[in-house]
Image (cartoon, helix red, strand yellow):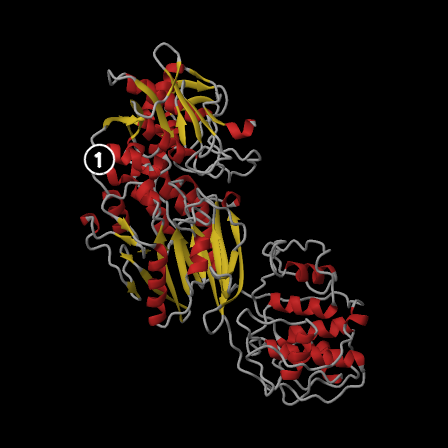
Amino acid sequence: MTLKRKKLFTATTATTLVASALLVTPTFAATTFKDVPSTHSLFEEISLLASQGVITGYPDGTFKPGAALTRGQAAKIIANVLKLDVKNVTNPNFADVPPSHQYYGPIAALAQANIINGYDDQTFKVNETISRGQVAKIIALALKLEPKNNDALPFTDVSKEDTPFVKALLDHGITNATGTTFGANEAITRGQAAAFIVRALNVFANPTPQPQPEPQPEPVEKDFELTILHSNDTHARAENAPKRAAAVKELRAENPNSLLLDAGDVFSGTLYFNEFQGEADLKFMNYMGYDLMTFGNHEFDLGSSAEGHKALADFIKAAEFSFVSANVDFSGDDKFTGLFNDLTSSEPEKGKIYSGIVKEIDGEKVGIFGLTTAETADISSPGKVKFENYIEEANKAVKAFEDLGVDKIIALTHIGYDDTAAIDNDLELAKAVEGIDVIVGGHSHTKLDEPVVVDKNAKGEEKDATIIVQAYQYSDFLGTLDVAFDEKGVVVEYAGKLIELGKYTDDPGALEILKPYKEKVDAVQNEEIGATATESLANPRVTDEGNKDGLSVRKNETALGNYITDGMLAKAKNYTKKEVIMAFQNGGGIRSNIGQGPITVGEVISVLPFGNTLALMDVTGAELKAAFEVSVGKYPEENGGFLHVSKGTKIEFDSSKPAGSRVVNITYKDAGGNDVAIEDGKTYTVATNAFTAKGGDGYDMFAAAYANGKVTDLGLSDWENLRDHLKSLKEVKPATEGRIVDVAAQK
């Protein structure tokens, strides 16, 4: 937004489209703008244009006549004046004006009519201001107004290029020479633009110039413009960091008023994390100059390890930026002593956690607070770290900022864009909490190509707009949001998109940082396990590009899930004399695919990167049925707790039935190969990972079994179990077998 400004509008030919379009009836009904009373000097001009639908106001009922007019606003007004068709238009191919942009139609129509064009970098820069001289040029070209004589222009501040256009306006009475300056390079206000347009309409209807009083200069209420660069759910994809660094460097150079934010889940997902536990990722974040980060659920994955959250505490201490977390209470874990305080700070320290912080940017104060999903207690291993109600804590954070006089507020969240509404998500947050201007989110891995606007509260009543953004996953994109705030801290303009990082050349400095980490990872990554995949073993998600079938590891049987559970069952049977009837694996714990060809250690670890161990559990048939009700309860929505099952097990469910009563039948094969139905009152031994056995993903029945001493952790690494199983097969062929069946689909 705050880029070096080039030319704004260039009209190469005068349009003939205005012949009838400019004729309006000069009736002045009272405006509905609460800041334009009948006593306002431009009341009649603004009222006329409002009554004709040429101009509109803001959601708060104001027009803001003293605010600077932006390029996007100017395009909309001019298109309205010309009554251009803004629907059947040719794409102008401005990189920052996609078809879904609010000003796309007007901008495309004006470009098609050769009234405007963009910048040399193929952008339009919707939020930049337009000057008085540029507006004069557009009006003169649109009306084919020419100077009436060769008299010298009395103004000394008009460029040679713009002189004929300003002279034409002067000669036709649209402006007057009341001094030696025209203010050609000054930003025109919304009110001044209205006055120019009405005079132009009058001139077109009556070519005889009528003396018009020059609108009194009003102080320009310049909006505060901020660029937010954001990442989320990068999951230790350190190899992508050099491209992200290149994009950050480029965009920050263009946008000095900027923030670089991360919405969590830097931890877990690749060998870079297994080997270095966040150290590599932090090196890049420090190098790029991140301003803030909030915590994702995977930041707490190591909590159940012997060292607990030591790696996370070390990550925080070594960070050259601060962390925000309003609803996470670290006080119960002594590893965070001295790192965490439940305060809002205007002078935050690096390597410390705050509820919220105040950043001063170009003399303006911006408040940022953080939120982490309460699901973390079920889907990770937070231990003594506790999670508080996100709505309550968000309201507290907003009030704390407002008490400090801060009215521009950003929520940096890891609660999901449209995740389980009953627990937490960004859409519900935007509706429930007044005062949040921007939500920069993560957790749901949502690819928001453009910002989403929430302008109604939970009751359906209008509210100040909240802009929501999220940048997909794995450092595939860098999110950008340009947002403008008025003098009251209300969002009045925005534009955002995702930058595809694959198109960037690696930043040389970041490549040097990557080198020693990559050498070690490559050595492990490339070690072959002694098995070959005849085809790729996919790990689909609904959000994957090109996933037309909508299959997902979090709601459908997959070949990879089958191999994992078969390996768990085989290993478990070697470690107990009990009959282990089945094994199951949560879909949320399966994190990557295995490519065609020789399978490597790195691939296997990337599939199961969380360091889980194999556990045996004694449960009743009733508890198993209750568990599988949880597994399929959200179907057809994705569910990280969806359970893949081992060979011989068959789960039949009916998705047409209400959640909680969907399981139709559960069978397993006994030692003789016979299908046996589960009985409610009988106790069975099953195998799963320790995370699920302890009640992860909301399996309360397993948590109770664990608490009652019915779980035995064998301490066997899950990825090693998978490696050994695949190695025993030597040749791995992708196939599903109907282990999990929705009978509703067969009706």
Can residue 608 be seen here? The reply is no
Identify whether 464 is placed above or below 525: below
Percent from the top left, x then y, of residue 395?
36, 62
Identify whether 332 is placed above or below 69: above
Which quadrant of the view contains residue 87?
Answer: bottom right
Identify whether 65 is placed above or below 367: below
Which quadrant of the view contains residue 676?
Answer: top left
Which residue is identified by label 1? Answer: 707
**Viewer-proximal residue, 138 or 426?**
426
Which quadrant of the view contains residue 711?
Answer: top left
Q: Residue at x 60, y 71 (%)?
A: 130
Q: Is residue 462 left or right of residue 159?
A: left
Identify whether 218 is placed above or below 448: below
Can residue 393 be seen here? The reply is yes
Q: Is residue 87 left or right of residue 148?
A: left
Kind of residue at badge 1: Ala
**Viewer-proximal residue, 472 or 156?**
472
Assign the C terminus to one quadrant of the image: top right
Q: Residue at x 46, y 38 (%)?
A: 658
How packed is label 1: few (under 14 Cα within 10 Å), some, or many (20 or more)?
Answer: few
Can you name the residue that lies furthest to the top here?
Answer: 672
Q: Is residue 680 left or right of residue 466?
A: left
Percent from the top left, x then y, of residue 529?
37, 20
**Viewer-proximal residue, 480 or 441?**
441
**Viewer-proximal residue, 319 or 578?**
578
For the residue labelled by badge 1, is the local secondary structure a helix, a strand or a loop? Answer: helix
Percent from the top left, x then y, of residue 269?
37, 37
Percent from the top left, x then y, of residue 597?
47, 21
